[in-house]
Amino acid sequence: MSIKKLVSVFFSIVLLCGLLAACAAPATPVAEVPAETEAAATATEAVVVETEAPKFEPGTTLVYIASQDWIKDPELELAKKFEEETGVKIEYQIIPSDQYFNVLQTKLEAGGEGIDIFGGQSGKTDIKLQLNVEKNAVPLTDQEWVSRMNPLSVEQISLDGVTYGLTIWDTVGGSWVVVYNKQAFADNNIEIPTTYAEFAAACQTLLDAGVTPVYEPFADGWHHVLWFLEMGPVYEAATPGLADALNANEATFAGNETMTAALTQIKEMNDKGYFGTDALSDLFADTEAKMASGDYAMTVNRFGLPKQIATAFPEVAEDNFGFFLLPLADNQIWNTNPAAVSKFIYSGSANIEAAKAYFEFLASPESLQYMLDNEPQFTLLNFDGVTASLTADQQAFIDTYKTQGTVYQTAVNYVNPQWMDVGTDLTALVTGAMTPAEVLESIDQRRTDMAVAAKDPSW
């Protein structure tokens, strides 16, 4: 809701309260008020409303620091509209993903350096340890939009009942799954795999036919980690209660047979050429072009990728792509994640009220619907009151995979904050510099270091 509308609503409430008070008053004679006096009183009321409504000045600039790929084009358009309505400009500072958290932490430790809004991943561990929201972020529990946000998303952005951030993301359709070229599968008589063996056989068939099986961009440092941590549901199914045991420091990653199998399969995929010859230098930003070319048959992405491809390359039909689950360790459980990219207001900002107004604007039903309708990557949003439409392929995926589980970067403490470090380890794995056992031991050591630093009683 715009500031002008807020002012109008506030003014209407003031008038309504006055009328109700008049109706409830005793029936005593009332002196007639001259028209000039009444007009002056009304003008005075209007002046009072105008001075109390906006708590920020037009011309304010909000500095928003975020990682690469976090700010979508529809949000940039909404920011322009917000500026038109309020006079408040949003200045984005976008940092490469492999540098972002180091840059953010450096800025926060240095006192904010002019930051008003900062981006980060939600998830209780992340917001406490990596972002330290209790110190660095403004509490937002009393904001109206919190009641419309998915409760699971609210939980992952809150500590001790206090909500610190705004998550606008596709946390269901945003699951990371295998997006595959249906024509490439049909041309090579490949069925959707349900085991790793079937998947590996499909990859070999494609490779023999001159098609690179999987587009896997390692260079950004984060994407290839999805193959391991998104497999949390299958780790949990193999060892029920494992996430709780890990959080209680009663279990380790090291020695886990299912995790070891998944890492071994990732290395095998690279060794056999299933990721192609340029995976270590490939970039996530090139995904649409690579998949549109037909040179690659699969990639790990979200429900929205086919629309993104069709938007960027109109000659490629959206319905030429389907979806299935990441099949490592024979996984058939839908990996879901209620945590996602989120926005926080820096506690040291001089423009907190303007930032709150921007969050309110973004979380309005109108803005959310605009975001969903205009961001190809999103098929659903984690808010009530937003209407989504699904393609036949998206619906087929939902109808096929009924069992869901939470990914381990969210289910297990002290995992997501080391995402980029895990990425470094996995690159070392596929290049032969680390073994699966060493990767798991490295993850355990970082978890221990973070837990000790956080004075976790389980450690």
Image: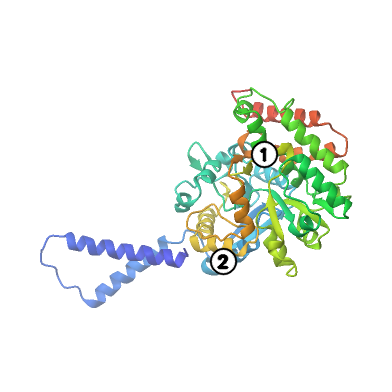
Q: Amino acid at mark 2?
A: Glu
Give coordinates of residue 439: x percent, y percent. Answer: 78, 32
Sequence-first tag of 2 and 1:
2
User: Looking at the image, which residue sits at the far left?
Assistant: 28
From mark 2 to mark 1, how far is it between C-alphas? 34 Å
User: Looking at the image, which residue sits at the far front?
Assistant: 189
**In the drawing, does residue 300 fall left or right of residue 339?**
right
In the figure, residue 310 lies in which quadrant? Answer: bottom right
> Coloured how?
rainbow
Q: State the quadrant of the C terminus.
A: top right
At x 62% / y 54%, what residue is drawn? 396
At x 72% / y 42%, what residue is drawn? 327
- Residue 104, label in figure: none
The foreground one among 205 and 256 is 205
In the figure, residue 453 lies in which quadrant? Answer: top right
Q: Residues within 10 Å of mark 1 (few under 14, many from 20)?
A: many
Q: Which residue is mark 1?
A: 416
Q: Which residue is mark 2?
A: 83
Q: Amino acid at mark 1?
A: Asn
Q: Does 235 appear above or below 297?
A: above
Asked whether disc 2 touches disc 1, contact meaning CB atoms under 8 Å apart, the reply is no
Task: Tell me, yes or no, if residue 171 can be seen here.
Answer: no
At x 74% / y 54%, what residue is drawn? 180
Q: Secondary structure at mark 2?
A: helix
Give coordinates of residue 196: x percent, y percent. Answer: 76, 40
